[in-house]
Amino acid sequence: MKNKTMKKQLTLTLLACAALSAQAQNTFEGQFTRPLGEVLEEISTRFNVRLAYDIDTVGKVLPYADFRIRPYSVEESLTNVLAPFDYKFVKQSDTRYKLKKYEYPRRTDADGEKLLNYLCTLYNDQAGFEKRKAVLKKEVRERLQIDKYLAMRTGNAPILSKVRKYDGYTVQNFALETLPGLYVCGSIYTPRSKGKHALIICPNGHFGNGRYREDQQQRMGTLARMGAICVDYDLFGWGESALQVTSIGHNTSIAHIIQAMNGISILDFMISRKDVDTTRVGVNGGSGGGSQTVLLSVLDDRYTAACPVVSLASHFDGGCPCESGMPVTLAGGGTCNAELGALFAPKPMCVVSDGKDWTASTPKLEYPYLQKVYGFYGAADKVTNVHLPKEGHDFGPNKRNAVYDFFADVFQLDKSKLDESKVTIEPFENMYSFGPKGENLPKNAIRSINGLGKYFGKQTVRAAAADESVLKKAREIIAALNLTDEKAANLATTAVYNHRRAVRDWHNTHPYTIIPEVDKATGRKLSKVEREMMADKTIPASVHERLVKDLNRVLTPEQVEKVFDGYTVGKVAFTMQGYRAIVPDLTDQEAKVIEGYLKQAREEALECKSMKAISQVFEVYKTKCEQYLNENGRNWRQLFKDYVNKRNAEKAAKKAAKK
Ligand code: ZN
């Protein structure tokens, strides 16, 4: 066992050596190996292009390196060089390429076209498509594991707030306990007119401020004024859900399942209301909410009209785990959101797209495909596309107007009531179920992502729980500043969180073994902690620069220093105290120099993960301090000796006094 570990370490050390002296490997025997970073630099120079790095090249070596370069094509060269590491490039301009990790939910328009062409070979009439529909509907449920979690639900009635009355509509908050201890909160916008109303479930996307933002309230209120009950609800880990699982919860595969479960559960309780007309049930959302719109329309046959906005594509499944965290698009041997949307045929669907995101392809690719499928049912006119070529990725007025027009048409809403200026924009607090600070969160509520381990498996929540502890540490460091500006506090917390997470990840993927055991320059054998400190230092400078830049944007220089002290557990002040004790007559000039060194140590230690490595950095600078004192007329050894003797004498005197 021990032997095996040693062997592994040796291999890693050898690999690191290989990277350092790669030129020697550039032979047949050495598989023509070269460091990846070096090869990419060469491509950049050779083809005169700039490469932006969103990837890690440290320690990565490329076999048959030069043979992968195609002298006539920068793109073919990049493809060949990046592919062995599962990296890719995105062209940003004729002279600039961004290097990225493989993104499983994102493909190219050309891929989308090929997939749609392939899918069209699987069916060419209604019967054929119905067969495919049955397979996909079954497999999507299985791949999402939704039925397992639907069966675990409490079935409890929601907690409802007081009703707030506005011009032509009312708003009421709800908190629904889905799994025991897990709540989804949202608001119900109801027309003030009597009788049965259409119902529109509105899953949210990732636009800033979530469902609380102004354009969301405008859409909910306007549709309610026009005669439809509208319900929106927090994304998992956003809004009041963050009281339970922090924002980290959203970045998990669980988010995909929970958000679908929330949509289904909310429809369950809404549809039991006497004022809901069950023949007019719609679903509508933008961006990530559009992905949810399509997913809910596949999972739930109760919907009679659907309107996904700036989301549906054949070549992008949605980049957030709440859209692609579970492998839904692997259903039926491989599908995409366009085909999942087509399963809604022949019921009315309106697809809203724009010219500046991945939905730019809609008029040419996805819409003709949808029309073809709807055509199998003689219903090609039931699917419509509002394309806004000059617009980008948002839920702006023209997108909202498309939504109003569609539902007014299919649900016979009162278009004369379409007037967004009549909607009252509420402060966020009005829309909370659990109070402004979450003080009314029920006693049984889960308060950490770990609390979901019992439902989703400890393994599933482990990484998120680790991130959650980084976030809590970041909050603790910023809380020590007692900032009154909440926005600044949030931005500073995010900066510290991002930085500490990057450092943790770097540390975990760059163990001390990437540094050779012997220092090449001096021939000295390095200690494990020294190697760990050196391995931590290989982190790109941009990680540090980003932290400093982000903090300085919202904090004063003194506050930034306090944050650094939080990282290094107050070592600067503590060590300074030590020097003052050892050198009782320390001059202002000496103190200034020493403090300068210690602050340098603090800054350098920010990218160290372990306390030992942080101390190691301070040791290096303490040596510098002592050298400085010696070079300026002091005798450090003697000073230290005197200090120790003095301390011992004091101790002895104390002991004697006690007797
Ligand atoms: Zn998401």
Image (cartoon, rainbow, N blue to C red):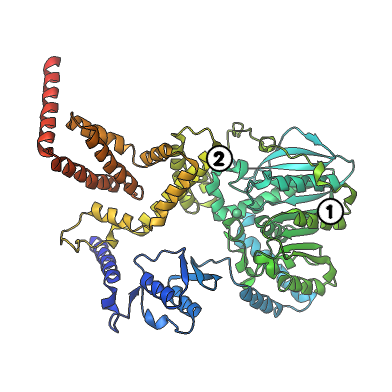
Residue 444 higher or lower than 224, as above or below: above
Please report the residue visible at 59 percent of the width from the left and 70 percent of the height from the top. Answer: 107
Residue 438 image offset from top left, x and y in percent: 60, 34
| For discs 2 and 1, the disc positioned in front in the rendered view | 2
Residue 155 higher or lower than 117, as above or below: above
Residues 289 and 335: in front is 289
Q: Quadrant of ligand 1?
A: bottom right
Find residue 464 and name its label.
Answer: none
Q: Is mark 1 within 8 Å of ligand 1?
A: no
Identify residue type, mark 2.
Answer: Lys
| Label 2 CA crowd tier, 10 Å (few <14, some 14–19, many 20+) | few
Residue 447 image offset from top left, x and y in percent: 53, 39
Quadrant containing the C terminus is top left
Q: Secondary structure at mark 1?
A: strand
Left or right, residue 140 beside residue 57: right
Please report the residue visible at 76 percent of the width from the left and 73 percent of the height from the top. Answer: 368
Residue 77 image offset from top left, x and y in percent: 46, 79
Residue 227 in view (yes/no): no
Residue of label 2:
487
Left or right, residue 353 beside residue 255: right
Identify residue type, mark 1.
Answer: Arg
Residues 414 and 600: in front is 600
Residue 600 placement: quadrant: top left
Residue 481 placement: quadrant: top left
Q: Marks 2/1: CA distance?
A: 41 Å
Left or right, residue 120 beside residue 408: left
Residue 442 higher or lower than 551, as above or below: above
Residue of label 1:
280
Quadrant containing the N terminus is bottom left
Q: Secondary structure at mark 2?
A: helix
